């Protein structure tokens, strides 16, 4: 059973490492936009790449923010209902990491939209 969890952990690390690269490549190259309708159904692999990208960006940004927040003592925090201590620094860093990841995701989407409008303008 331990081997199964190790294999799943390796696959998750690979997924989180490759997803941002695929997402950025799509944002730069313009793929895979099959329709111009923003409300068209999204394929499962596009959702998987998006979730992997957000997961990776949250991990990277939150670890960086946690290092920036060294002025907050690690002893500040509270214990949850299971008795596990949760540091205020770690909680703040996860919140900022999630918001920052959504911001990066949004900026890359805006860049892709801007690039598409420039291509349409050049084509006409």
Image (spheres, rainbow, N blue to C red):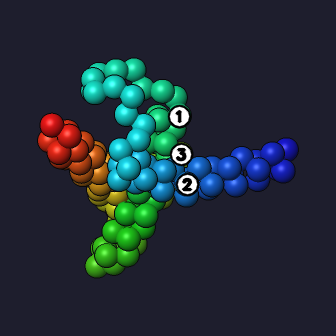
| Residue behind mark 3 | 82
Q: How many numbered marks, from 0 up?
A: 3
Mark 2–mark 3 distance (CA, rounded to whole Å): 34 Å
Give SS at disc 3: loop
Question: For the point 51% across and 38% down, which residue is it?
Answer: 48
Q: Could you tell which of marks 2 and 3 lies nearer the N-terminus?
A: 2
Please tell me the numbered disc located at residue 45: 1
> Split into 4 quadrants, where in the image is the N terminus?
top right
Say left or right for 31 vs 92: right
Residue 122 picture location, percent across and down: 17, 45
Mark 2–mark 1 distance (CA, rounded to whole Å): 13 Å
Q: Could you tell which of marks 1 and 3 lies nearer the N-terminus?
A: 1
The answer to whether residue 113 shows anywhere in this view is: no
Please tell me the numbered disc located at residue 56: none
Say left or right for 123 vs 49: left
Between 59 and 93, the one nearer to me in the picture: 59
């Amino acid at each position: 059973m331990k081997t199964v969890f190790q294999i799943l952990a390796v696959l998750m690390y690979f997924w989180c490492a490759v997803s941002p690269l695929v997402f950025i490549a799509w944002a730069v190259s313009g793929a895979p936009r099959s329709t111009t309708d923003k409300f068209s159904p999204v394929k499962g692999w596009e959702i998987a790449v998006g979730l992997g990208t957000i997961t990776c960006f949250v991990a990277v940004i939150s670890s960086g923010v946690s290092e920036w927040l060294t002025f907050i003592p690690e002893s500040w925090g509270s214990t949850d209902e299971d008795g596990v201590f949760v540091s205020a620094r770690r909680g703040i860093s996860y919140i900022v990491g999630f918001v920052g990841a959504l911001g990066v995701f949004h900026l890359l989407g805006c860049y892709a939209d801007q690039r598409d409008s420039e291509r349409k303008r050049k084509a006409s």
